[in-house]
Amino acid sequence: MPINKINSLNPPFLKKGDVIEIIASSKFVNKHDINLAIESIKAAGFNVKLNNSLFNKLDVFSGTIQHRIAVLQEAID
């Protein structure tokens, strides 16, 4: 289905004080990997939420495909 004004969603722009959740939807991350991202988000005036499973590790991934899908969907919801 092509995207157009009839069937697309336009969420409001983020504003200072909004919460940005960091998830690992593919490769695993460690705290060192995301420190700069956290600092940058906070410096822009946003609050940061780290997903409970952010630092999970399964081989090179952040969990099973089913788990990563669930984490992404939960963050969107």
Image (spheres, rainbow, N blue to C red):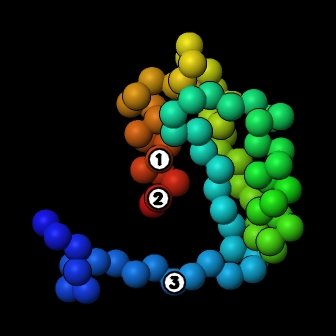
Q: Residue at x 62, y 21 (%)?
A: 57
- Within 10 Å of disc 3 (Cα), the crowding (few <14, some 14-19, many 20+) is few
Q: Is residue 73 above or below residue 77?
A: above
Of labels 2 and 3, earlier in sequence is: 3
Q: Tell me if label 2 and label 1 are in contact, CB under 8 Å.
A: yes
Q: Position of residue 11 (x, y in %)?
A: 46, 79
Type of the residue with mark 3: Pro
Give the structural element (helix, strand or loop) at label 1.
helix
Q: What residue does disc 2 label?
A: 76
Q: What residue does disc 1 label?
A: 72
Q: Which sits in the foreground, 1 or 74?
A: 1
Q: Residue at x 66, y 62 (%)?
A: 20
- Within 10 Å of disc 1 (Cα), the crowding (few <14, some 14-19, many 20+) is some
Q: What residue does disc 3 label?
A: 12
User: Gap between marks 1 and 3, in whole Å?
Assistant: 20 Å
Q: Which sits in the foreground, 73 or 31?
A: 31
User: Gap between marks 2 and 1, in whole Å?
Assistant: 6 Å
The answer to which image quadrant residue 61 occupies is: top right
User: Gap between marks 2 and 3, in whole Å?
Assistant: 14 Å
Q: Which sits in the foreground, 39 or 54?
A: 39
- Within 10 Å of disc 2 (Cα), the crowding (few <14, some 14-19, many 20+) is few
The quadrant the C terminus occupies is: bottom left
Type of the residue with mark 1: Leu
Type of the residue with mark 2: Ile
Dot label at residue 45: none
The answer to which image quadrant residue 30 occupies is: top right
Count of all numbered marks drawn on residues in the image = 3
**Tag in front: 2 or 3:** 3
Of labels 1 and 3, earlier in sequence is: 3
Q: Is residue 4 above or below residue 50?
A: below
Give the structural element (helix, strand or loop) at label 3.
loop
**Horizontal relation, residue 50 to residue 44: left or right:** left
